[in-house]
Structure formats: structure tokens, C-alpha cells
Amino acid sequence: MTPHTTRLSNARPLYLQKGSAQHLDIDASQRLRIRVKDQGERYIPLHHVSRIVCSHTLEISSRALLACMQRGIPVSILDVDGNPLGWCLGVRRIETSLRQLLRHALDDPLWPELYSEWLHRQNVAVATHALLMCEVPATPTARHSPRPALCNAHFQKHQQPCAKPLDALALLAQQELAAQLAEQASDPQLLAWNRPGLNLLNDLGEVLGWYAHIDLHHAPMLPEEAKITSWSIKHYERHTRHWQQRISQLMHEFEQFLRTHWL
């Protein structure tokens, strides 16, 4: 295990969204300094952080942002509704096999056709698994439109709408996926904006989002709307191992797809 791998395995996400955090800076000891409203300051060593998820209202010093970029710590900035405004994925690091494969793939005129077909199969497979795990009969209608069928099952169980807590869980998974993709691809343009319509972060995040249905369906209860953010973070962290396995499996499937056509 390399020192960098050790750092990642010990580090944890830092969530600074919809909270009282007002300013993020870094001191000479490479500790993140977080100013919290009415509570003074708290300090977190930078090497304890795997990624940062923050509100667009948080003031981030250029020193803190540059330190994150140099260490390859992704920063995700969310709007008032919790949707990503953008990602700061850091500087390029060493070449990786995934990076090389993606470069070959994106230069191939057949990429859009092959990728669309693979992505469709992934969505169908994981959505069908979610239907099974949520005990929703896999009727032709449910297979054709799995999200409404799943949401109807959630409503029948919890007796309240599921869209917002569902999206909150899925977004946390997408953020962790983005961090791992950025770590391996080492170039933001390979993950998004390389060409019109390309956004691997959103595409693969959508596949991963089907698993959020399983977690939500089997949750003891759903939160009130005002507590969705804190509930989703606690629930996600409680099931971190499952999510890491899901993300690893999806990334393995994606790499195998690339290797099949462009190795």
C-alpha cells in the first residue's frame, strides 16, 4: 500500500453545506480552519480529508483551494437546492491506466455509440436489481419506467414523498464517485466537457443512484424536509462500506468496458 493510498483510506469527507460554516482557510500547519457562526473556529488536518462538499455561500480562501488542488482533494460546490454548481478536481497527477484508456476511447469515432449502449445496459441492470431488492414486481411497465415504480413502493412503505431524500443520498454517492474518478483519470476534461454531451460524472452517478432506492426503501423512517441533509449524511456514512463496494464495482465495470474496446 502506498502512502497516498494510506492517506485516502484514513481520510473522510468534509461536509460544509447548509450549515453554519462561514469561512474556510488553511494555516501554516496544513490544517483547514473553519469559522463557524457563533462557535468560533475549528481545525482539521488536511490529510484527514478525502473530499469537501460545501455550499456556494461558504467563503473559501485561495490558499485553502490551492492546497486542496495540490493534494488532489476534490471540492464540490452546491447551490441552494443542493445541486452541484461545479467541481474543483485538482491538478493533474501521474498517468494512470484509466486515463490512458479514456484518451484512446474519446479519440475513437465509435465512442458515442459504444458508450451509450454500455451505459444503457448498466442502468437497466442496476435498476432491475433495485426493483428486486425493494420487492417491486418487475412488470413490463416497471422495467420500462423503474423510478416511478420504485418511488410508488417507497411511498406505500413510508407514507411520504421520497424524491428529496432519495436525491440527497444519490448526490453523496455521486460526489464520492467523482472523487475516485478524478483520482484515477487525473484530468477533469476526460470526465466532463471534453466534447458536447460528455459528462461521466453525471452519467455514472445516475447509474449509482439506483442503489439509493435500496437504502431509502429499507430505512426505518424518512426525515422531515428540514432534516434531509443531515439525515442523508448520517445514513450514507452508516452504510459507507456498502457504497464503497458499489462504487468499486461500477468503476471496475467501466474499466473493463474500456479495456474491451481500447486496450
Image (tube, helix red, strand yellow):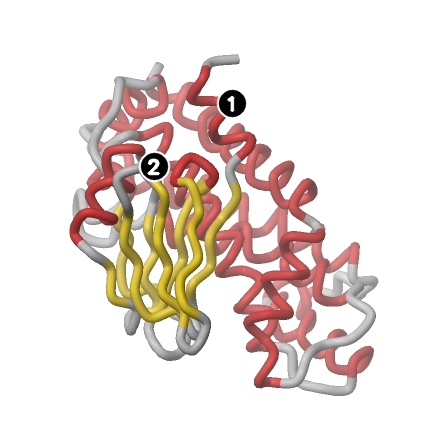
- In the depicted view, which residue is nearer to us: 140 or 91? 91
Q: Is residue 183 above or below residue 148?
A: above
Q: Which of pointers 2 and 1 indicates the residue nearer the eye?
A: 1
The mark total stands at 2
In this rendering, position of residue 13 left or right of residue 178: right
| Residue beneath disc 1 | 6
Residue shown at 59% from the left, 51% from the top: 124
Residue 216 in percent (x, y) is at 71, 66
Callout 2, which amino acid? Answer: Ala
Between the C-alphas of marks 2 and 1, the distance is 17 Å
- Specify the quadrant of the image occupied by residue 246: top right
- In the depicted view, which residue is nearer to us: 83 or 39? 39
Residue shown at 68% from the left, 67% from the top: 142
Q: Is residue 10 above or below residue 79?
A: above
Residue 155 in percent (x, y) is at 74, 81
Callout 1, which amino acid? Answer: Thr
Q: Is residue 189 above or below residue 75?
A: above
Residue shown at 61% from the left, 79% from the top: 227
Task: Tell which circle, 2 or 1, labels the residue nearer the N-terminal end.
Answer: 1
- Mark 2 lies on a secondary structure that is helix
In this rendering, position of residue 189 left or right of residue 74: left
Q: Residues within 10 Å of mark 1 (few under 14, many from 20)?
A: few
Label ID, residue 182: 2
Q: Residues within 10 Å of mark 2 (few under 14, many from 20)?
A: many
In this rendering, position of residue 189 left or right of residue 1: left
Residue shown at 32% from the left, 37% from the top: 29
Residue 42 in percent (x, y) is at 44, 57
